[in-house]
Image: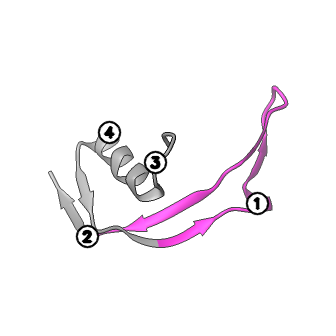
Amino acid sequence: MELGESLEDTAKREVQEETGLAITDLQLLGVFSGPDCYLKVSNGDELYAVTAVFYTRNVLG
């Protein structure tokens, strides 16, 4: 996620970058976070992941 970018814009950009496809009309299915999304890596850094899941049938490319 880039600074100032919305979740929806992030999803669109990431799909474009990874697949070359353009997606539109995203529907938010859910946001997942909390204690189950905690990770401590070997260097001691602690992370909490937040995952947003979108759905669309509108794919171009």
Q: Earlier in the sequence, mark 3 or mark 1?
A: 3
The amino acid pointed to by label 2 is Arg
Magenta-drawn stretch contains 35 = yes
Q: CA distance from mark 2 to mark 3?
A: 23 Å
Front position among marks 4 and 1: 4
> Residue 25's quadrant in the figure?
bottom left
The amino acid pointed to by label 3 is Glu
Identify residue for label 1.
36
Task: Kindly state the secondary structure of the residue where label 3 is placed.
Answer: loop
Residue neighbourhood size for the residue with mark 3, other residues' Cα within 10 Å, grouped as few (<14), some (14–19), many (≥20)? few
Q: Earlier in the sequence, mark 4 or mark 2?
A: 4
Which stretch appears magenta?
Answer: 29-56
Task: Kindly state the secondary structure of the residue where label 4 is placed.
Answer: helix
Q: Is residue 16 left or right of residue 47?
A: left
**Residue shown at 53% from the left, 61% from the top:** 52
Identify residue for label 2.
57
Residue at the extreme top: 43
**Residue shown at 80% from the left, 33% from the top:** 45
Task: Kindly state the secondary structure of the residue where label 2 is placed.
Answer: loop
Front position among marks 2 and 3: 3
Q: CA distance from mark 4 to mark 2?
A: 18 Å
Residue at the extreme right: 44
Q: Is residue 52 left or right of residue 57?
A: right
Measuring from the top left, give residue 14's x and y in whole percent: 38, 45
**Residue shown at 23% from the left, 49% from the top:** 21
Counting the numbered discs, the total is 4
Identify residue for label 4.
17
Identify residue for label 3.
5
Magenta-drawn stretch contains 3 = no
Vertically, is 19 above or below 33?
above
